[in-house]
Image (spheres, coloured by chain):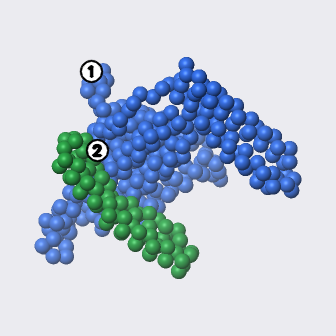
Chain colours: A green, B blue
Amino acid sequence: MDGMVAIGAGLAVLTGLGAGIGMGIATSKAAEAVGRQPEASGKINSLLMLGLALTESTAIYGFVTALIIIFQS
Amino acid sequence: MNLVPAVGSAAALVIGTVLLVVRRRALAAAQGSEQESDLQKRYKKHLILGVLALWLGCGLGLGMLAPPQQAELHVSVFAPRMTLLGFDVSSSVVVGWIAMALVTLAALWARIFVIPKFQEQPKGLQLALERMVGFFGEYTQEKAGFSSDPLSAYMLTIALYLSACAITELFGLRPPTADLVMTGSIALITFFMIQYFGLQHKGVGGRIKSFAQPTPIVFPFKILSDIATPVSLACRLYGNMLGGMIVMHLVYMALGTFGVGIPAVLGLYFNAFHPLIQVFIFVTLSLTFIGEAAE
C-alpha cells in the first residue's frame, strides 16, 4: 500500500475526534436534563437519539472516505 | 485426523453437557422452595464452566471438520457483481429482491388471513398492526406538520423494507443497504418528494421565494443544502451499514472456528439494533425536510 494512501486515510478518519467530543457533551447535557426532570425522560431520550445519529454522520463521512481511499487505489 | 483436537473437543463437549445437566437436575429438584437462590449461587460455577466447555468443544470440533482457509480482510466498497439470466447485476439487487419478497409475503399473509378476521375490540396481532399504522400517521403529522395518508404509508413501507434489508445480514448475505447505489436511490425518492410537497403546498413562485428567505443572499446556499440533503441521507445510511458489516467481518475473521455464540451477541447490536436506529433516523429526517419544504 502506498505511503500517501495511508497518510490520506489516516487524515480522513480524524473527523471522529469532533464527533466524539460533540456526542459526549450532548449526552452529558441530556443526563443533566433527565436528572432535573425525570418525567420528561422519554422525550429527552428520543431527542438525544436523533441528535446523536446526526452528529455521528460526520464521523461516518470520514470513515467512508478513508475506506474508499484504501480500497480503491 | 489429528488426535489432540479430536480428544480435546470430545472431552470438552462431554464435560460441558454433564455440568449443565447436573445443574439443571439440582435446580429442578428444588423448584419453588426457599433454597432456590442459594442453589443457583452454588451452581453458578457449573453454568460458567459448562458454557465455556461447550464453546471450546464446538470450536475445536468445527476446526477439525471444516478447517479455515487463511483469509485476509476482503472488503469492497462496491457489492460483488453476479450474472443473472445473462444480465450483469450486483448482489445488492438480488438480495434486495429477497428482502422485497419477505415484506410482500408478510403483507399478503396479513391481508388474506388476518384482516378479514378483524373485530371491534382489537387484540393481539390486530392491535399491533393498528398501533403500527397509527404511530406512523401521528409521526408524520408531528414531524412534517401536515397529515397525509400516502406519505405515512410510504414511510412505513420504507421502514419495513430497510429493516428487512438489515435482517438479511443475519443470514450471511451482504445487506443491500451497504451499497451506495441502493441508499442513493431511496434518498433520491425523498428528494423528489421534498420538491413535490413543497410545490404542492406553496406553488412554484412561493417555493422560489422561500429560497430567498430571510435575505436574497442565502439563495445559492439554500439550493446547495437542498442538493446536499439526499447525499447526506444516502451516505449516512451507507456508512453506518458498511461499518457494521466490516466490524462483523473482523469478528468472524478473528475468532476463526471459535466464532460460536460470541458473534451472535455482537450481531444483536450490529445487525439488529443499529440498523433499526438508522432506519428511524432516515424516516425522521425525510419527514423533517418534507415538513420544512411544505411549511
The CA distance from mark 2 to mark 1 is 24 Å
**Residue type at the position of mark 2:** Leu
Determine the secondary structure under disc 2.
helix
Query: Residue B208 location, x and y as percent?
Result: 16, 65
Of B109 and B187, which appears nearest the observer?
Answer: B187
| Marks 2,1: beta carbons within 8 A | no
Residue A58 versus residue B213 in the image, above or below: above
Kindly indicate the quadrant of the structure image that contains residue B89: top left
Q: Nearer the viewer, mark 2 or mark 1?
A: 2
Of B79 and B23, which appears nearest the observer?
Answer: B23
Query: Residue B242 location, x and y as percent?
Result: 35, 46
Residue B14 versus residue B267 in the image, above or below: above
Answer whether residue A58 is visible to the viewer in this image: no
Image quarter hosting the C terminus of chain B: bottom left
Determine the secondary structure under disc 1.
loop
What's the chain of the residue with tag 1? B
Taking the spot 40% from the left edge, 63% from the top edge, the residue there is: A52
Q: Is residue B81 left or right of residue B271?
A: left
Name the residue that disc number 2 marks.
B180
- What label sits on residue B86 in the rendered view? 1
Residue B107 versus residue B37 in the image, above or below: above
Of B90 and B99, which appears nearest the observer?
Answer: B90
Of B186 and B79, which appears nearest the observer?
Answer: B79
